[in-house]
Image: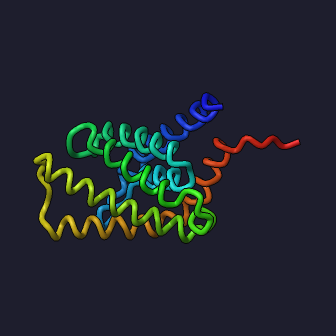
Amino acid sequence: MLTRQLSLSVPIFLFIFLFQEAVVNQFKLPGGGFSLFAIFALVWAVISTPEIAALTGFGAGILMDMSQSAGGPVGQWTLIMIIICYGVSYLSYGDGNINGNPVGVVFIVVIANLSAGLLFLASSALLGVTTGSFTQILFTLLGNSLWTLVLTPIVLPVFSFMHNFVFETRTVL
């Protein structure tokens, strides 16, 4: 069972990551743009169990650390994504009001994306990584959150379908 889920999830994660790196990163959008891969990982975590979400956070964080646009030391995004993905899943697991409601999922993903940005900023300060000015950081965090708010409802049905395809074990007769 776990082998089937991993063999289906890994290519999906790699495809979304490569699409992010090859296509989405080429867009120069106001407000810092968005991370389709982070949105994907957070949606996957919200609709998964906490254990799967922690594994999702680890895999997504490793890939985000290997991104050419990632700033900071290797392992920083891994730690942040494990914390955020597990926390989001833990808070929403078993609550049908959040998992069963697309508005709740969008709200949780936007808050989690903003929290990931704030955690990245705080850990960058602790690790001595240089950051921009306060207004530049604020503009980027707000812009990224707004882009996430706009994009998440559009991609949520596709990501939810992929999650159901991987984790549903019902057979159709």
**Nearer to us in this view, 148 or 55:** 55
- Measuring from the top left, give residue 50's x and y in whole percent: 50, 48
**Nearer to us in this view, 33 or 165:** 165
Residue drawn at 55 percent across, 48 percent down: 49
The relative height of residue 119 versus residue 53 in the rendered view (above or below) is below
Residue drawn at 32 percent across, 36 percent down: 66
- Measuring from the top left, give residue 135's x and y in whole percent: 16, 70
- Measuring from the top left, give residue 173's x and y in whole percent: 89, 42
Q: Quadrant of the N terminus?
A: top right
Residue drawn at 45 percent across, 44 percent down: 54
- Measuring from the top left, give residue 169's x and y in whole percent: 73, 41
Identify the image quadrant of residue 68.
top left
Residue drawn at 39 percent across, 54 percent down: 35
The relative height of residue 103 versus residue 36 in the rendered view (above or below) is below
Q: Is residue 82 left or right of residue 3?
A: left
**Nearer to us in this view, 95 or 113:** 95
Q: Number of callouts in the render? A: 0
The way the protein has been coloured in the rendering is: rainbow
Q: Is residue 167 left or right of residue 55?
A: right
Pick out the residue farthest to the right. 173
Q: Is residue 70 left or right of residue 134?
A: right
The relative height of residue 118 versus residue 48 in the rendered view (above or below) is below
